[in-house]
Amino acid sequence: MRRLGPFSKLGRSSLTDAFRCSLSHALRYTFADYPVGILHIHMNPITRTYDRRTVLRAAGATALGVAVAGCLGDDGPEGTVLPPPENHDRLSEIDLPYPYYGEPLPEVTVPAPLHDREVTTTEFVGDRHTMLTFLYTNCMTVCGELIYVLRQVQADSIREGYADEIAFMPMTFDPEQDTPERIDEYCTMMGVNRDPDHWFFLRPETPDQAKEVVEDTFGVAFEGGMDDSHDDHGGHDDHDGHRDSDDRHEVRHFQHASLILLVNRDGIVERAYDGGPPKAGTEIDDARALIEGY
């Protein structure tokens, strides 16, 4: 059992329903390498047609049939290490669209183009804890913060010596724009450390697969937004409203929910940070407490 500090009792002060109607708010963020900016998020409701919590719990019965290495959390479900998050009693009665505390991590296999192979989300069960999030690289709102949270834990894992005990799996839901080359550039731009072999950027092969995996399986809703057209060389519209430059680019933006999952190495969700990133430092405290609990 690794000792990194006291067991974290921190959790989300409140978890919001990722699909509530007309969620609009402003977030302020500061990156070590980027200027401060204002983020505006708007999400539309999407109706679920099945009880995914029942499905997950049925899958969890099989997962928990295997010997569970983790300790029991304080009054937490079997297989958890961290204590229940705040508002757990209320949230545990809600059919949340995403995997929640004490539920098994859904298993899907998605290409990881920077590793030139496919990765299964449960690939590291029995070996490593994992963190997942869902984004697209052209996002101008919350996606940068989601990656920043994972990057903060990555940096801490390297400093504190648990880099070989955790894996990171950000996943794009925009495979058309997020080509392998674009993903590579984005990881560099966001300061991802490539030396530890624990960062797997997942890319569904098609928009249909992205919808099936990200929205239908993980419960992270997204809708294609309007195209923003621009070019890099000052092209302009002609009288018919067309650009006269061959360097015109169309960048499609999405309205989407946000979710970060912290999953223990037995494949059980310990934290589901939704509605935006967690309070600063919470993700590191939770990751350290998870490492300490094994």
Image (tube, rainbow, N blue to C red):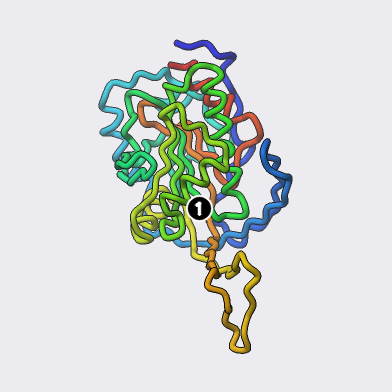
Q: Residue at x 34, y 23 (%)?
A: 127
* Residue 221 percent coordinates (x, y): 48, 56
The N terminus, quarter of image: top left
Q: Residue at x 72, y 46 (%)?
A: 28
* Residue 108 percent coordinates (x, y): 31, 44
From the viewer's perspective, is residue 107 above or below residue 210? Answer: above
Q: Nearer the viewer, residue 74 or 159?
A: 159
- Whether residue 199 sits left or right of residue 154 in the image: it is left
From the viewer's perspective, is residue 258 above or below residue 267? Answer: below
Q: Secondary structure at mark 1?
A: loop
* Residue 216 percent coordinates (x, y): 38, 54
Q: Residue at label 1?
A: 136
Identify the amino acid type marked 1.
Tyr
Count the labels in the image. 1
Residue 57 visible here: no
Residue 293 visible here: yes
* Residue 209 percent coordinates (x, y): 34, 56
Q: Nearer the viewer, residue 117 or 152?
A: 117
Residue 173 picture quarter? bottom left
Residue 24 picture quarter? bottom right
Q: Residue at x 43, y 20 (%)?
A: 72
